[in-house]
Image (tube, grey):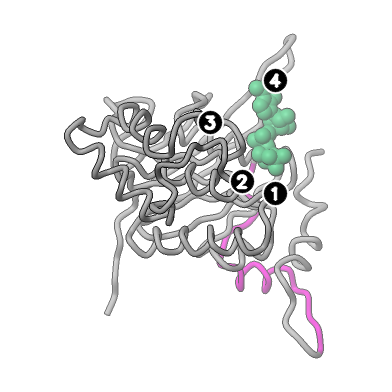
Amino acid sequence: MLIISSIILSVQNLCKTFSSHGDDFKAVDNISFDIHAGEIVSLLGPNGAGKTTTVSMVGGYLIPTSGQVIINGVNRYQDKFDSKVGIVLGGELGFYGRASAIDNLLFFSDLARVPRKNQRTEVARVLELVELTNVSNKKVQFFSRGMKQRLHIARALLGNPPLLLLDEPTTGLDVEISAEIHRIIKQLASQGVAILLTSHTMSEIESLADQVLLIGAGKIFSAGTVTELIKQSDIHHIDRPATLEESYLAIAPKLRRP
Ligand SMILES: Nc1ncnc2c1ncn2[C@@H]1O[C@H](COP(=O)(O)OP(=O)(O)OP(=O)(O)O)[C@@H](O)[C@H]1O
């Protein structure tokens, strides 16, 4: 049976040029891709390739120089845009340390435009999804980094957005906590959430990504599944298949800015 899922995010010919002192710098140069419901797409490329700039334009933090960001059929920068997008930038900041997880999320529920009467139920739902229900009354200042990262994901899920943007979601987290975050991300995708992920961690991309976009100097260099990208790199071993890291290292010099 052929299953066709709907396109949640369509990025079309997206460009961002930064100008300073009369010089123009093309951080993102004509990028196009789609993400369907339930799909995890990963941006992979060297530092400065344009990944965060792309995520920021999709998330509404940065206005594109040209091109389109269409979410659930609505053009983010042209139409009256009211789709929800969950964004996880992560890190130690972003919450009121002296307030509980519940109170923090109740505050963010207002920003996510969750109706007042539904807020407590919604906060309980997202805390359950990231398995923080048992510490929901604890002050956030006593949370570990992994717990804070899960709380960032919970915040992004308020209002049930169809699209989740995850910028390096496990940077600085240990293997066990990263695996737990991966499990949550997979569960969200299985529930139909479209996910755009940036990562430098090959095992994370291998474990999560349905599609990988290799990005260098602001352009998409190639795209495909992990298996397809490994095939494209044409690395062969007698006794085992090539890894994504080996394939990436073979291509990496071509991804650098001139
Ligand atoms: N506000 C800005 N003004 C000028 N240049 C910028 C600005 N923001 C980003 N850049 C430049 O645009 C390029 C792309 O940056 P971006 O942060 O998108 O890269 P990235 O792929 O996310 O890198 P990393 O892997 O290090 O996070 C970089 O060369 C960066 O220095």
Q: Quadrant of ligand 1?
A: top right
Q: Which amino acid, by three-letter code, is at mark 4?
A: Asp
Mark closer to the observer (3, 4): 3
Q: Nearer the viewer, residue 95 or 142?
A: 142
Residue ID at (41%, 33%): 104
Q: Crowding at label 4, few (<14), some or many (≥20) Cα neighbours within 10 Å?
A: few
Q: What are the residue bounds of the magenta stretch?
A: 219-238
State the image coordinates of residue 134 (x, y, percent, origin top left). 41, 53
Q: Nearer the viewer, residue 123 or 211?
A: 123
Q: Is mark 3 within 8 Å of ligand 1?
A: no
Q: Crowding at label 1, few (<14), some or many (≥20) Cα neighbours within 10 Å?
A: few
Closer to the chain start, of discs 3 and 2, is 3
Asked whether, in this view, residue 30 is left or right of residue 107, the answer is right
Q: Which mark is residue 145?
A: 2
Q: Which mark is residue 97?
A: 3
Mark closer to the observer (3, 2): 3
Asked whether, in this view, residue 219 is left or right of residue 247, the answer is left
Q: Which amino acid, by three-letter code, is at mark 1?
A: Gly
Asked if residue 14 lies in the magenta stretch, the reply is: no
Give the Cα separation between the discs numbered 2 and 4: 38 Å
Q: In which quadrant will I find the N terminus?
A: bottom left
Asked if residue 227 lies in the magenta stretch, the reply is: yes
Give the Cα separation between the discs numbered 1 and 4: 33 Å
Give the Cα separation between the discs numbered 3 and 4: 41 Å
Residue ID at (52%, 46%): 166
Q: Which amino acid, by three-letter code, is at mark 3?
A: Gly
Q: Nearer the viewer, residue 13 or 10?
A: 10
Task: Tell me if residue 133 can be seen.
Answer: yes
Contact, mark 2 vs mark 1 (Cβ under 8 Å): yes
